[in-house]
Amino acid sequence: MSPEQELKPLFQRIGLDRAEIHTRIRYLDWTPADGARLNQHAEALRGFHDDFVDSLYVYLQGFEPLSRLLRDENTLRRLKGSQREYYRSLFAGPYDYRYVHERLRVGMVHERIGLEMKWYLGAYRLYLDRLLAELFADSEHLPLFASLLKAVFFDISMAVDAYAATQRQALEDSEARFARAMRGANDGLWDWDVEYDRLYVSERWASMLGLTRDTLTDSSQSWFNRVHPDDLPALRQTIDTHLRGETATLQHEYRIRRGDGGYAWVLVRGIAERDRNGGLRLTGSQTDISERKLAEQRLRHAARHDPLTGLANRTRLDELLHQLEQRQLHGEQEVAALLFVDLDRFKLINDSLGHSVGDQVLIQIAQRLQRCLRHGDHLARFGGDEFVVLLHNIRTNQDAERVAQAILDTLQDPLQVAGHELMVSASIGIAPLNQPGQVREALQAADLALYRAKSAGKAQYARYSSELQAAAQHRLELENALAQALSRDEFELYYQPIYRIDEGRPQLRGVEALMRWRQNGRPVEPGSFVPVLEESGEIIRVGDWVLREACRQVREWQLAGQPLLSCSVNLSNRQLLQPGFAARVMNVLAETGLAPESLVLEITEGVLMEDSAELHANLRRLARLGIRLALDDFGTGYCSLGYLKRFPLHSLKVDKSFILGAHTDPDLFAISRAIIGLGKALGLTVTAEGVECEEHLEFLQREGCQYAQGFLFSRPVPAAQLACLFETQPDRRHAPVN
């Protein structure tokens, strides 16, 4: 660095520009005449100056602090030469900018070698004292002036020390405040000379890594070599971006290696500036943010994992599926699969044993499922009792089926939970994930397959196929159409007559109302749309319409000459489990004018198996109102015989599957006969369905069955067509169907 460059910051700090120099000269009343007078004596005083310099350095060596500086002969010789040159220029000039420059350089050199200001001023006093003696030896006032110089220079040294001490105190106070603030902030400081690659770090910077400053070099490698390899490129890029002036400040989070080999998360902040010499420096602080990062990590984990089982949740599953899709989009040929696992009848555990036991079941199930997976596969709790398995890098789709079977097998062993031994099974839907498009629709596909497994009997797995998708689409269209069918007047009631057969010639005594649907003018089989109404819940609204329409029509027939005609209407379990259903039935009877004893409500064994408080209450209310209750399709379900006495039933209906073969199959004959006998023994009336030939009718009449319906008498027909049968019924005095 040139002398000009070195002194430039000093000029700037003093504020010593040309205007300031001229101000000082004017204040001293300096004129060119002063310079000329000094020039006239320059040569005459050369010998004096040489002698004075020699005697000065002898004098200075009598003081210990100065003698240490003057022990080296080369240093002493250089200083004497510099001192003589100074005295020469003091008289010879020239008194220009170079003169000022040289005076500042001398002061800077003295400060660097540790020469205190008092010694420098003392030497000036001695010089003036000897010079006055040389010039004015015959003056009687010379001793007086010499004494005055001593006092004045002592005062000057005191004033200079006071100025310097006050400035040092202010600087120390400022530095102390800064140090306290930095200790309070717990930050480490650093200063990097970018051009010369010299790095300074504070003791705190080192201690937060479990190091000392002595263990670190003064280059930036002592910093960058400790940065985590995964974080180093981003840190360097952030620094380079700031050094190019593209950001106002430097701010970046990264990991740095501690002395024990572990990593700490830190936040580095800084700013790049040019120093007084024009060099580029980057200065800032470093804060340990490991605790905050750990808290953030916990929050991220909590946001992506189920708190009960510790498994990934739906958010994390979405991320895993997105990552898989991205890999496939970038050309990776990965065969994967998704398994949707749903526990069978888990609600029964919660309802009977409580949610705390249910939670323990879910935890144990999650542990068993996890043991069925390989390293790299993922298990997520999708919600409630639903789990999703993401299988990576399987060889074929059959591998997914093997994992599904392993899950079914591991659930065969009973669970021991809170003193209870529980058997829990599951149904599983499998969907392939071999193409990006499949990933986007994976959950829907696996859910469709799960629905197939559930409908096929549970405790098994099913694979997704395009046929399932088509069926689901058809079902959705069907549900939408059924939701609008009532408002579009597309439903119609058909009626199948019910005959009394135990009093001689069969007599028409009732009708069963059966719902029919014409979609866009085309008839739809009841077996394809009634289950959809049940599952969607639309059966409640449609069922109310059926009940009202059937009661209205039968009452119309009664008023037209069939006063003893009864009406049978099928109910779904959803209707009977509705609060206030009995009151709604009474409202319908009141609106239509049909007497309660003219209405028969048919229920299935599946409804009785619900065995809920609401079901009991509704059935008892209906029975008290005088409405007849019939158990439909008896013998085809799993109803216990005890239900026949627990519920207020009035009638049994023998399913047609028994009647159709009773005259040829001994087993069916025995079953039909037993059901009829059981009903009569319990005081219930019995109605047989599916009577299609004279042999069926003769068998039923021999066994004492009271009522029958079937194709032998009539198929279900519209109301207008059924009215023709009334003309053939002369005897209208028999009791209604019970």
Image (cartoon, grey):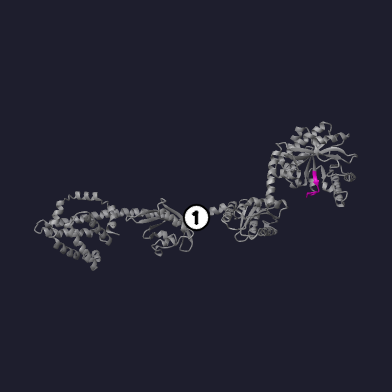
Q: Which residues are magenta?
A: 631-641
Q: From the viewer's side, name the closer residue of 145 and 529.
A: 529
Q: Is residue 216 left or right of residue 27?
A: right
- Assign the C terminus to one quadrant of the image: top right
**Magenta-span inclusion, residue 508:** no
Is 73 rendered above or below residue 665? below
The quarter holding residue 553 reads: top right
The quarter holding residue 68 reads: bottom left
Q: Is residue 491 left or right of residue 736?
A: left
Q: Is residue 56 something that shows in the picture?
A: yes
Residue 688 location (% of width, % of height):
84, 44
Q: Is residue 352 something that shows in the picture?
A: no
Q: From the viewer's side, name the closer residue of 252 and 616.
A: 252
The quarter holding residue 402 reads: bottom right
Tag count in the figure? 1
Q: Main secondary structure of the magenta part?
A: loop
* Residue matched to label 1: 293
Residue 359 location (% of width, % of height):
64, 53
Q: Secondary structure at mark 1?
A: helix
Q: Residues within 10 Å of mark 1 (few under 14, many from 20)?
A: some
Residue 163 location (% of width, % of height):
26, 53
- Most extreme residue toward the front is 331
Question: What residue type is disc 1 on?
Answer: Lys
**Magenta-span inclusion, residue 637:** yes
Residue at image location 41% in from the left, 59% down from the top = 204
Residue 676 location (% of width, % of height):
85, 46
Q: From the viewer's side, name the closer residue of 332 and 551.
A: 332
- Assign the N terminus to one quadrant of the image: bottom left
Q: Is residue 575 left or right of residue 75?
A: right
